[in-house]
Amino acid sequence: MLCSIFQRRKAGPFQLTKFWGGLIQANGAITQQNRSFYNTFKHLSAKDSLQPSEEKVGAFTRIIEAMGFTGPLKYSRWKIKVAALRMYTCCVEKTDYEEFFNRCQMPDTLNSWFLVAQLHVWMCLVRLKQEGRTGKYMCRYIVHCMWEDVEQRGKVMGINSTVLKEDLKRMVENFYAALFGYDEGILSDDHVLAAALWRNLFNRNCDDPRHLELLVEYVRKQVQHLDALSGEDLLLTGEVSWRPLVESNARSILKPLAPVYNDEGL
């Protein structure tokens, strides 16, 4: 049943503090070399990723947004919703889940799929928050698409509606807790980000620090990669590509080709 699949392990003592201080020297010894790239933010704009661009809005716009309505956006809502759906699709279809499961020794379950997809959705949200109010609107619709997808997958699996409802409620709570942890991690050093990945992606079940180092490196380079994308292209097309989980030169970054779109945003 989905209930057992989605059940998270009970919190145990934080086992990583002993080795993340010096990055363990045993069992495949993780050394400190080549880590300056991931610990310094001068190569990344991650610190700015959570700071939406300032937009001058009138008093009326502030009032209607305070009431829960959406004010005028840079592009039409229809175009933004199409782009948001496409971006979510990139998160779930352009990610090599099998490689994640094999290299990080994660069980091949629906819960593991969701945790990996959730990580990529979060990275897209971080990037879009730089695009002001329009980016925030797109963020909300991406999250909406994610829950619609998860619910449909549960129904296809034949999960009882009552059980599915409880599982979705638990997942929503875990999702927003994960967003908070990842946000703190991307704005801090590798120790904090590794702790967030250990709690949320690995469900506190990872004894090999090499897996955590791999995922910390992956997140840092993906955030850098997304920062290189044009905000206008993201809002109009939603096209996102992902760098490989493992690559020979993780420090290199090539500016991706600009996507092609027409006046309808397709």
Image (cartoon, rainbow, N blue to C red):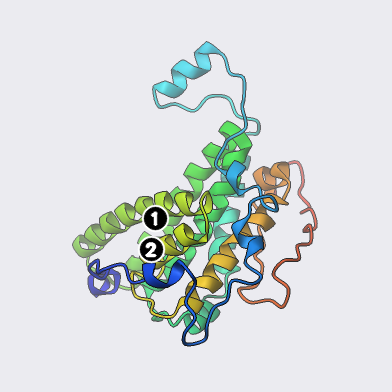
Q: Residue at x 62, y 67 (%)?
A: 35
**Which amino acid type is shown beneath numbered disc 2?**
Asn
Q: What's the amino acid at mark 1? A: Ala
Q: Is residue 23 above or below residue 147?
A: below
Residue 186 seen by the camera:
yes
Q: Residue at x 29, y 74 (%)?
A: 5
264 versus 162 height, above or below: above
Residue bearing the label numbered 1: 178
Report the number of numbered marks.
2
- Cα separation, mark 1 vs mark 2, equals 6 Å
Contact, mark 1 vs mark 2 (Cβ under 8 Å): yes
How many residues crowd mark 2 within 10 Å: few (<14), some (14–19), many (20+)? many
Q: Where in the figure is residue 59, as x and y percent of width and height?
A: 52, 12
Expressed as whole percent of the image width and height from the top left, the position of residue 228 reads 73, 51
The residue carrying mark 2 is 200
Foreground residue among 223 and 147: 223
- Residue at 62% across, 19% down: 56
